[in-house]
Image: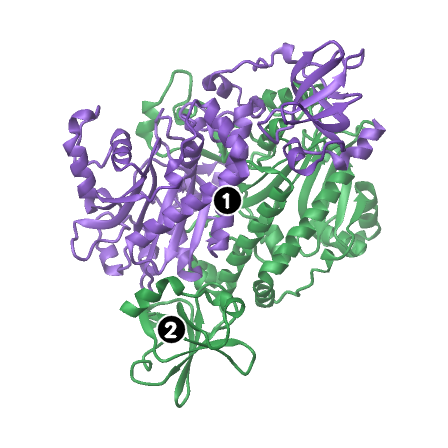
Chain colours: A green, B purple
Amino acid sequence: MLSIRRYFSSVQRIAQIANASKPGETLQVQGWIKNVRRLKNNIFLDINDGSTSEKFQLVVPRNASTQQLASGSVISAVGRVQLAPNGHYELHADAVQCLAEGHLQDGYPFTPKQKHAPEYVREHLHLRARVDYIAAQMRIRHKAQKAIHDYMDELHFVQINTPILTTNDCEGAGEVFRVQPDSEQLLKQMARPSVPVEQSYFDQKVFLSVSGQLHLEAMSYGLGNTYTLAPAFRAENSKSPLHLAEFYMFEAELVHMEQLDALAAFIERMLKDITQRLLNSSASDLHFCQESANAGSDIAWLQLPWQRLSYDAAMAIIMEHKDKFKSAVSAADGFSKEQELFLVAHCGAPVFVIDWPTQQKPFYMKVSRSDPQRVHALDLLMPAVGELCGGSLRECDAQLLQAHPQLPRDLSWYVELRKFGGLHTGGFGMGFERYLQLVTGVKNIRDVIAFPRYPHSCKM
Amino acid sequence: MLSIRRYFSSVQRIAQIANASKPGETLQVQGWIKNVRRLKNNIFLDINDGSTSEKFQLVVPRNASTQQLASGSVISAVGRVQLAPNGHYELHADAVQCLAEGHLQDGYPFTPKQKHAPEYVREHLHLRARVDYIAAQMRIRHKAQKAIHDYMDELHFVQINTPILTTNDCEGAGEVFRVQPDSEQLLKQMARPSVPVEQSYFDQKVFLSVSGQLHLEAMSYGLGNTYTLAPAFRAENSKSPLHLAEFYMFEAELVHMEQLDALAAFIERMLKDITQRLLNSSASDLHFCQESANAGSDIAWLQLPWQRLSYDAAMAIIMEHKDKFKSAVSAADGFSKEQELFLVAHCGAPVFVIDWPTQQKPFYMKVSRSDPQRVHALDLLMPAVGELCGGSLRECDAQLLQAHPQLPRDLSWYVELRKFGGLHTGGFGMGFERYLQLVTGVKNIRDVIAFPRYPHSCKM
């Protein structure tokens, strides 16, 4: 035991061994046994420490002390790195220390070497990180966030922690969660005349944020370009594999932004750049997830120039092919996911649908000065997931904004931003989980987030 | 106007001019006029674009077109960089384009050149980013998060987005917010027999997270070392300058962690490293905030070795000096903030108080095998803010955990983690806003977060 302790600081993560070690070197690994193969003289153990989806083999002599090793146990071994005939590194050790027994036969839900349906894996949420494709997803999710933070920081954007608790209802959609202290006693203690007692903590109704955009705008009016990568919430009764009650939104606001095309160009450059960073950092995890999801590893869109289509041109294409769609085609409702994917296939590339009918879009979008029936808005449509980003130039004219029939009550502060030294700003929001689905090919959004929350399910 | 458009992509952020430009170079800046000084032939404008707290001067000829320029307006100017006699760069331009009028006389709350009390500034939350020390705070906050993400990524920690919505009540403190859809109609639509209708969305009571620790542990049991930097919530009726209803927690969980001293060493190394990164990226903003807060720029703790004190030794020191404290000294309650600061001063350095009485700490902390009255817990006490981090080794024995009288109901999943290939883990949580208060000297926590939420206040 003492020797292990002494070596503690030199424990090598399996993911780093191929880069950091040379054959013949002595090092220590710690991890879970994923698989055991017993041959005549040696035992071959597949070891996983959570750092990689690639297999790593530990070879130890078969004897009384190693005979008991079983899948699921946590072990520590000091040995010598060797290059196996298949070209992979492996570790040859004289002995293995078992740090904890796996006890897999006592009710562990995941049978080693067996592939389990995602629905079944999701039922055991607390143990799900031990399933290889979930662990790979979590590492990819980490690296995708890192790529976003790195890219935006290099371009001098300031990350703003937009609030989770808000008194705005940004989209006016009504599909929001309400928040109040759980303690009746606290509510009574804080009660004030003329405030309903359940609102006494904040003196008004408070919701979970559906978007950080309006808050970003307020900050951009002092700081310049800003962004946020934060949880957002929708109280929808949706079983869709593309929706969650709690999800992450990557939103950015760019100042001195006067052309929708410049905003589209920024989004295209940014998404290509962060995806390239992700390919550089996480190639084997991406490949592993795509294989697990039976998805192709086709991200040809990285090399293509992305297209632009006006809403009218896009609608004309859909109308021309309207017999092909399951859902009815209606010019009033925008596009269904089926139609979005058709447009992407039709263009042979991701496509920005621009210049939307004013009545289909929210109050904050900038109205075309040459055609008030159109706003400077864009939707980015991608393969597999359909809409990935929505964005727009923001209405910079305080009077137009004030006169908008859909301006929510209590947004006088938002109008006032424009009054004192107004700016031309534009921005976008991207569903972060949809981006992860896009790059990994995972069908169900519940499998790209650690703790999915959806109707009738909030485990742990 | 056309020439400005053509130059758009070459707009230089003021913060980069000193590093990226040479005297004589032509460049474009865009920003707000902070101050105007009119001399005989020239007008001197202080320009701010949100990128720096340092002043940047624009010099233009005094003529009919520049005569109207006033504080608060947004301008664009193309000119030549020159080195001023004071050693700073400035821009000399022939003309200035006014992009938007400031209209400061029409109700703008912040008088140029006047210093306003933080309480007053906070009342105008939507315009607060235009106040220099708030903008500086936001940039520091961004860079501090970037430093944490960079450091943890370099050490191969995986960032986990621990959930905001949870059915756990981690601390069992009862000071939690409850969440439900705002729509009565949705609740009725989703109702199921035997579930109270207000709980029908998730089939149970759902709270806002007070900590991501337990969720991190579940993930570490598959991924190894993990961390989170995420919002947390407390429904306390506190007016304290150290508490918010919505705040950010930086939490990490380390696997194969068997010694409390190793955990303390990790925390010390990490905090020194991210603070050094912050000093490298944000020296002038830090200095500006410290000056605005009338705080010293004394972070001598960066160079000192931090101390360790057992709880018993710390309590003995407090008892020895008990006449010095405003609040009564009681061995049952831990330390008041006054006492924490006294211990830091007494040690002449930040200090880890370790080995706490079992009864003062939560159920998940590892009980000393040699003295069951003690847990392997630490509090890190710092100058100015008192407790900055709390951490512990986690109880790894499923049976001890199961038998703990304070184990919350419904945490069978947490106990089960230990059953199948258990790990020795340890971790800590740090209030991110307290860290920002520590490095900037800002007294009130409401001024280090963009949108503070506290009793009777949830603006925007």
Please name the residue shown 37% across and 35% down the image. B234
Q: Is residue A405 above or below residue B421?
A: above
Do tags 1 and 2 sit on the same chain?
no
Q: How many numbered marks, from 0 up? A: 2
Say which amino acid is labelled 2.
Val
Q: Quadrant of the N terminus of chain B?
A: top right
Q: CA distance from mark 1 to mark 2?
A: 33 Å
- The residue that disc 1 covers is B147
Element class at badge 1: helix
Please name the residue shown 84% across and 50% down the image. A320
- The residue that disc 2 covers is A78
Tell me the subunit letter for badge 2.
A
Say which amino acid is labelled 1.
Ala
Find residue B307 and report its horizontal and vertical position in percent. Answer: 28, 44
Residue extending farthest front: B85
Find residue B240 and report its horizontal and vertical position in percent. Answer: 35, 26
Please name the residue shown 34% across and 33% down the image. B383
